[in-house]
Amino acid sequence: MGITGVPSDDAVLDTMVADAGGDPATVRTVTIGFNGVQDLEAGKIDAFTGYVPSDGVQVEADGYPATSFDLDAYGGPRYPGLVAFSTVDKISSEPDLMQAFVSATIKGYEDVLADPQAGLDALLAENPAIPERFAKASLDAYLPLFEAGADRYGRFDAADLRSLSRFLIANHLIDEPIGPGRFATNEFVDGSG
C-alpha cells in the first residue's frame, strides 16, 4: 500500500481498513510521496491513498480499472476539500476584499453547478493541454462534492468539522479539540449575493 508520507495517511488507511473488518497492522505500507498514480500503473504498489476525484479519475482515464473508497464511507469524517485561508488581521482590515473573493468563488462554482458543460468548456479553453476525457471524468467526480449536503456551495457544517476534530484527536494528529469557529466561518458565504 502506497502512502505519501503525510501523517494523516496512516490515520486514513487504518480507519478504512478497520471499518471494512480488516486488521490495519497487517497492511504493509511504503512511502511513495505523491506518485500514487504512476506507481500503481507501473505495478510497484497494489493500492495508494489519494484523492478520488483526481487520482482515482486519472487511473481510470489512463485505462486501468480501479476501485476507489471514500474516507467518509469507511469510518472517517466528512471534511471540506477546498478551503481558502487568510489571517484574522487581513479579514478585519479588508472585509470587502474577503467578501468579493468569496462571492466570486461561489459564483464560479454555482455557474458550473448550473451548467457543467459550460464550466468544462471554459476550463479546456484556458487549459488546452488537459485531455478532455480526463477533465470531463474529473468534473463528474467533483460535482457531487461541490455542495456535499450543504444548502449552497461554500457553506461548512460545524458538525462535520467537530467530527473531523475528533478523528484527528483519535489518530494522534492533534492534542485537543479545535472548535469550528476557530478556523472557519460562513460569514462571507452568507453575506455573498
Image (cartoon, rainbow, N blue to C red):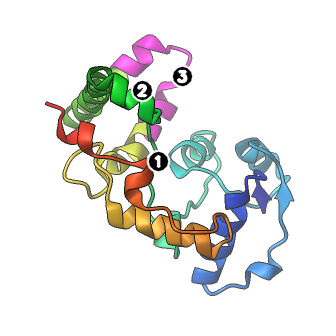
Q: Which residue lies under the disc numbered 3?
A: 130
How far across and down, in percent of the image, does residue 59 sit? 63, 45
Circle 1 SS class:
loop
Quadrant showing the C terminus? top left
Q: Position of residue 87 (x, y in %)?
A: 47, 33
Per the image, the residue denoted by label 2 is 90
Disc 3 marks which amino acid? Answer: Ile
Decide which of 82, 143 is in the foreground and name it: 82
Question: Residue at image x 83%, y 65%?
Answer: 29
Amino acid beneath label 2: Lys
Mark 2 and mark 1: span between their CA atoms?
23 Å
Span colored in magenta: 122-138
Left-right relation of 174 to 53: right
Assign a secondary structure to mark 3: loop
Which tag, 2 or 3, sits closer to the chain's start? 2
In this rendering, the answer to whether 88 lies above or below 55 is above
